[in-house]
Image (cartoon, rainbow, N blue to C red):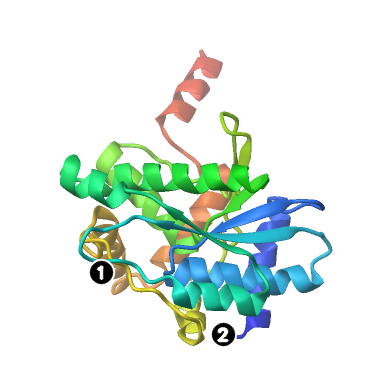
Amino acid sequence: MTTQKMLSVMRKGITKYKMIKDGDKIAVGVSGGKDSVTLLKLLAEYKKWAPERFELFAISVDLNFENNKTDFTPIKELCDSLDVPFYIEKTDIGTIVFDVRKETNPCALCSKMRKGALNNLAKKLGCNKVALGHHRDDAIDTLMLSLLYEGRLSTFAPKSYLDKIDLTLIRPMIMVKEMDIISYSKTLPIVKSCCPANKMTKREYVKDLISSVGKDIPSVRDMMFTALFHPERYNLFDKFEKDIDTIL
């Protein structure tokens, strides 16, 4: 997958949801994984020819796992090559989640605290937007997670405003497939996750579940993603109740 093709798909999402405007200062959350590193690279390339004039900053949140430190040197070197300012926000999130709280389901608390640290530094840097590396398949997996574990039909928004902190979250890769990110990121520096729960989460279970269904229904992810974009296909009980009230 070439940079040009990746940018073409990413731009569709940016344009559809009006994610970037002139004068924006955007902080890119960079964990070091394939998704966030790909997003950083693509936004830096997009910035060169985009109709919007905006600034980019890269932020990595150091979770500070006691016996397994993360080396962000490859990310720093990538940022230098892209001419993007790089910042590391040091925290004790790893210690709090795994040693103090001893969470049986650590992902929810870790995610909340990590986003809080990222957003706070973004505000200090004068940013008005934070870009996250979620892609098309993340939206699908979140939909399935919500259905199976919460009894809800819900996923994250491509763009959302956080009024408490006055920041807008954007997900520029909302239309990009994970398989294309995997292919594209092979040429980029990836920092291995030091999280003790890595690859042992409910999200991983759901990904495997959908992949299993995909063996019999190859288009399953395409169909699920299509459902997110077509409200006219929505046909749940509340709609029937409204129709009944009309008839009566």
At a point 27% along the width and 52% down the height, the residue shown is 94
* Marks 2, 1: nearer the viewer: 2
Question: Which residue bears the numbered disc 2?
Answer: 1
Q: Residue at x 26, y 58 (%)?
A: 65
Quadrant in the picture for the N terminus: bottom right
Closest to the observer, 65 or 233: 65
Residue nearest the observer in this picture, 100 or 243: 100
Judge the density around disc 1: few (<14), some (14-19), many (≥20) Cα neighbours within 10 Å.
few
Within 10 Å of disc 2 (Cα), the crowding (few <14, some 14-19, many 20+) is few
- Residue 212: image tag: 1
Q: Nearer the viewer, residue 234 or 18?
A: 18
Measuring from the top left, give residue 176's x and y in whole percent: 55, 68
Q: Is residue 60 left or right of residue 54?
A: left
Q: Earlier in the sequence, mark 2 or mark 1?
A: 2
Considering the numbered disc 1 on the image, is that residue within a helix, a strand or a loop? helix
Does residue 9 appear in this view? no
